[in-house]
Image (cartoon, helix red, strand yellow):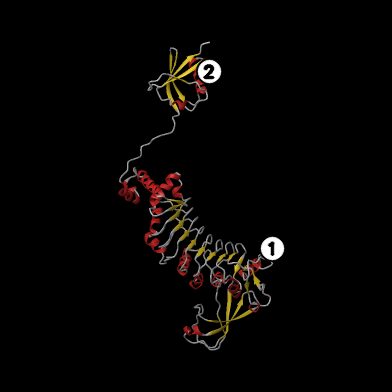
Amino acid sequence: MESPVCQDGRTFVEVINEKYSPENFPCRRGLGIGVVVVPTACPQGSPMKDRLNLPCVLVLNGCGITKAGDQSEIAAFCAHVMELDLSHNNFQDWHEVLSLGLFIYSFSVFPENTEMIKDRVMHIVIIAHGSHVAHELRFFFFSPFFVSTQSSRNRKKTCHIDTTSFQIGKIVSNIPNLEFLNLSSNPLAGMTLEPQCAEAFSRVRRLVLNNTQVSWDTVMLLTREIPELEELFLCLNEYSGVRASSVVCPSLRLLHITDNNLLDWGEDSKDILQRLFPNLRRINLHNSGLNRWEDIEKLNFFPKLEEVRLQGIPLLQTYTNKERRSLMIAQLPSISLLNGSLVTESEREDAERFFIRYHLHCPEEELPRRYHCLVNKYGKLEPLAEIDLRPRCHAQVEVHCEEKVEQLNIRLDQTVAELKKQLTSVVQLSTNSMRLYYIDRNSAFGPDELKYNTRALHSYNIQDGDEILVVPKTK
């Protein structure tokens, strides 16, 4: 049974302890599956157990996590973890959730040149706001966040730093084998990611940032710091465009950027897209805001793109299903999969020929660039002849009854019995008092009696100008 989420949220360490403890997860899947934690590494009263049944794929979505917790415990428990789902939690920053007041109480030497501090060992007392407990840390001072313009020796100094510091980074940096990370639906809008923190993501290969409203600049920073990133998910983040960037992400193969307000690829988009994702193979743009064929054509700037998923965009709403698929295939000559379906060579040729004919009557200045490429390939095609192979629905026939002749339009989908009912008002005979004959004007044979009341008229191949002969029955 889940414990209620406290007002200040829960830590990552608390949640994995609760979810994967032997009491809640009793079934061990073989010797050594659990992770041993040295008891002395845990402070007095730590909720951690001596052993947890922790799998290599952790699913901790919707657990109300706001903080990392003890990093040594994360490192001990999660060294083997490869996939981590932290979606639908309450991380509100890439860094610390609380502002900490850092009070530097004593140190050995504080020289004039602050660069010399890098190799000094500092004793720092961190006092959390709202807490009466101080924890003393001993660490090597490599971070650039502390700057002083005063010289001093063995004097108490106070430095206040607003460190919303490394909560997500604390978790990720302590999971050395992490390849998949899902941070979807954590409120990261407007939050800044420092390059030092971004380095913690360097081993991730698949990153999911759906519905985080994370900025495009942060995405670019992450792609720069993750050298082997292969899959990136950026759905529901309200992006309106792709801005120019000097970042190159040569390892990315799959990009999901659906359900955004993406309207264009920015200025000089050819240079941007070729440089940004040079090895991108698959892209999903469902429900984006693209509304111009020029934006579809710019997908060709991804030099190795093979698969495109592109449905629900404003541009395609007015087209039929056949027109949508054919026009997109013709615009994207390198793709082999469109919306999950294989594009065959014959389908591509048909689509490209359709594209030429579709634009035959467009003004010259409105013709897309792709039109001229295809005309060079196939020539300027003539419109296809329209051949209707559907059965005829009506025929204009002559109805002869004794000396009377009438022109009549008859339905060919009706039966002989229904035709007799139609003729009763014309020849003034009941259906039981008439016999019908069909005379084909182009046939050398004589009249063909319509004997079978349930037979459809179109099966006789009746054409315009043919005759129906009505003969009264003799008593």
Q: Nearer the viewer, residue 446 or 127?
A: 446
> In x, y percent, where is residue 289?
46, 53
Does residue 203 appear to the left or right of 327 in the view shown? right
Q: Can residue 8 be seen in this view?
A: no
463 to 245, vertically: above or below? above
Residue 384 can be seen in this image: yes
- Residue receiving disc 1: 1
Residues 369 and 105: in front is 369
Give the residue displayed 49% in from the left and 66% down from the top: 205
Task: Name the quadrant of the N terminus.
Answer: bottom right
Label whose residue precedes the other's in the sequence (1 or 2): 1
Q: Is mark 2 on a helix, strand or loop?
A: helix
Left or right for 21, reference 203: right
Estimate the x, y position of residue 206 in percent, counting from the top left: 50, 64
Q: Is residue 294 above or below residue 193?
A: above
CB within 8 Å, label 1 to label 2: no
Relative image position of residue 173 (x, y in whole percent) = 54, 72
Mark carried by residue 431: 2
How far apart are the two marked residues, 1 and 2, measured between alpha carbons? 81 Å
